[in-house]
Amino acid sequence: MNNLLHYLNTILSILAGRLPVTEPLINGQSQVKKVVWYNWFERTRLTFLVAAFALFLGVKSPWYSLPDEALKTFDTNLIIANLGRAIALLFALLTGAIALWFSRSRAARMLFWSGLFVVLLFPYFITTWSPTMAFLSAAYYKQGVEATHHVQRNFPKIQSQWKQNITLSQPEPIKSIASFSIKDSRFFQMSSWDLIWVEGFGYSNNFFAYIGRGWSATVAGLVIGLMAFYLGLAERSFNALISDMSRFLPWAGVAIALVVVSMLLPNFIDRHLDTLYAQGQYRPVVTISKILKTCYPPLQGDTEFLRREAEAGFYANQPDPTAIEFVKGLESYRRKDFIRAEEYFQNALATQPHNFLVREYLTTSILNQGVTYFNGANSPTNHQTGLAIERFERALQIFPAHIEALYDLMLARAANGEFDLSASVARQIIETQEYPQQSNLALLGQAYLHNSWASYHDGNIEKAWEQYRQSIDNKAWKDSGEAQE
């Protein structure tokens, strides 16, 4: 009986993780039994395995999601996001190795802290060193917001099949992706320094609208891995954490300070260029502007910066024909002469086919022509829906998956009685809403409604009713593949 109780106590001790385990008394002495296999089930090792699993999810899942057509048209790629997935893979393998064999030293802990720091800077790398990706995410986010606002403002009219009385909104281009700028001295007040995190480091709605699950899974995996390190140190965990922070935080602070200086310095130089331009020193303006665009890529997408550089080059007898065409287009656009603006932007795009800012202004100029035709060029009753449809389709060729262009085209085709074609555009809108983290509910509701009208006119009443339910109840939504059937 005593032996049975002893064995039960031994089993409970093993399950609780208390080692070593002893055999029953033999000749009055306790013998230590070497136990290996159940060491595997200690909570520290299991926590490391959970961290490795989360990191592998960071490798498998995308870090950033943008329409493939747009990436191809704008000649960009997700190389920075793919580098992030490579980092996740490295730490996933390292975490698995630590869980199985390697020692949990301070060097390993410092490596995990450094990895977490670099991964948290991912928004900064996107918004600063990949200007085309930053532009696309900002553009799609803005387009979705504007389309949603139009739905909300005109809900009674857009619910009607006959949309001749709807007034479409005139789109506006993104004037700059260099949103982190010093407007005046109030920037240096403590209350204004949240701009550093939101605009400078990229933690804005534009970025998080199209962030993938891979990034968040990697952050979670690194945090869980660090928890496993300190969990394994038991009573020494708090002292180890304080010691690690005293070593890591000074270096992290230096890195953050360098990043902040790298964002502030271009702003100071930009203000100095304004002074040089006002003084008529055009050659230094051109020279410094070219260098500054290379060192701080967001300025490649700043309208006023490019306008000043082009004008300075013209006055210094160093004209850049492409830049001059772009500035002429800007002036025509400002006067709302969208046809002339389109000509200038087309000329600029012909020599720089992957210039995202020129492509944005060209698309917006064509869209505004279509909106003018649809709303009635001379009177509210003078609708030219056919011309409007042609402009919207041309805009989509220049800027694929442009949400406002798709929305306007969907309404214009419905107003023209082309319900099947309107439903086809609606399905494209549904596809675009697979990329953002949070879909535009009002826009999706309208897309499903136009699908419903097409089914109704085709005589498929049952399918029309199902799609109408989808337009008013998101619980009835299907995935895009089913919606296209």
Image (spheres, helix red, strand yellow):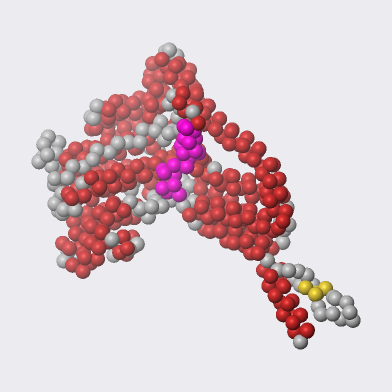
Reply yes or no: does residue 208 show up in magenta: yes
Closer to us: 334 or 37: 37
Reply yes or no: does residue 372 show up in magenta: no
Point 34% across, 62% down: residue: 479
Q: Is residue 143 above or below residue 342?
A: below
Magenta segment range? Answer: 191-211
Q: Is residue 360 above or below residue 449?
A: above
Question: Which residue ends up furthest to the bottom in the rendered image?
Answer: 1
Q: Position of residue 99 (x, y in %)?
A: 67, 61
Q: Give the left or right position of residue 6, taking residue 284 as reference.
A: right
Q: Give the left or right position of residue 343, taking residue 351 as reference.
A: left
Q: Position of residue 58 (x, y in %)?
A: 53, 55
Rendered-image quadrant of the N terminus: bottom right
Point 49% across, 38% down: residue: 197
Point 24% across, 27% down: residue: 335
Evaluate whether residue 366 shows in this view. Answer: no
Q: Position of residue 145 (x, y in %)?
A: 32, 44
